[in-house]
Image (cartoon, rainbow, N blue to C red):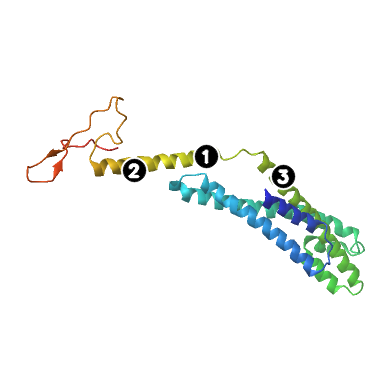
Amino acid sequence: MTGLTLLAGSFGWIAVSPAFMPYGVIVGQMILMGLGLGMTTAPATESIPGALPPANAGIGSAVDDATRETGGTLGVAVLGSIFTPLYAGHLPNTAFRPLPGPVLQAGQESVAAALSLTRAAPAGQQQLLDAVQDSFMWGFHVACGVAAGVCLLGVLGAALLPGRPGENRLRESENAEVTRLTRRAAHRWLGRPGWPPREPGAGSPPRPERVPQAADSRRTYWPYTRLPQLR
């Protein structure tokens, strides 16, 4: 939530910025955006593999990569679809209005083409350049505002989502697996069936007594010559 809030703040800050501003302001915006990305990407990357058992870590990593690539592609496509019509619709209302139709259409299709037209114009190059910059910033500001709104929706969605009870269940299953392996190892090394022993009086069989193998030997053996198969 904190990362998405920082991202929303950075996009909102950019949405109200002019075309020309000090470099220190740009650095501040980039630092804020970088902090937001770092605090959002790391938990999002860990959330999918962390919800799966270790045996399925590869599947979780693949799903995480797929979602990240899909989200980035859709984000660029959506913001580009918002920017393009706003830029193209704003340009005819500027100093490009008196230009011939084909020239105006070429400027609407691409910002780079519009800048080339301003350099090739015989007169009024500065007015045309200002028109291109104003049109670009108009579409750019709206796109950044939409991005900030999407980040705030993500903050709201994250606040409404429940916790992760699966983490407690995973920890319990891991503890149960450790207990099972411990009991199995004790059963194997001690050679006692029914390990661990139950409380006396709970219907548990009496523990076998050690029987000396020979009078002059200290070795002992257990009367159980065959242990039940472990599963």
Measured along the vertical axis of the image, is residue 10 above or below residue 176?
below
Closest to the observer: 210 or 94? 210
Question: Relative to the observer, which residue lies in front, 171 or 218?
Answer: 218
- Which tag is nearer the camera, tag 2 or tag 3? 2
Q: Is disc 2 in contact with disc 3, using a CB cutoff of under 8 Å?
A: no
Residue 106: x %, y % from top left? 80, 63
Residue carrying label 3: 153
The amino acid sitting under disc 2 is Thr
Residue 188 placement (x, y as % from top left): 25, 42
Question: Can you say whether 44 is above or below 225 in the image?
Answer: below
Instruction: Write the residue at 52% across / 47% down.
Output: 50
Mark 1, residue position: 166
Distance in Å between CA atoms under marks 3 and 1? 25 Å
Q: Nearer the viewer, mark 2 or mark 1?
A: 2
Q: Is residue 32 left or right of residue 50?
A: right
- Residue 96 image point, x, y percent: 89, 63
Which residue does the image show at 82% across and 63% down from the upper left?
A: 107
Give the image quarter of residue 95: bottom right
Query: Sequence-wise, which precedes: disc 3 or disc 1?
Result: 3
Q: Secondary structure at mark 1?
A: helix
Residue for badge 2: 182
The answer to whether residue 104 is above or below residue 173 is below
Q: Position of residue 26 (x, y in %)?
A: 77, 65
For the residues carrying marks 3 and 1, which lies nearer the camera in this image?
1
Q: Tell me which numbered mark, 2 or 1, is placed earlier along the sequence.
A: 1
Indicate the amino acid at tag 1. Answer: Gly
CA gap between label 2 and label 3 equals 48 Å
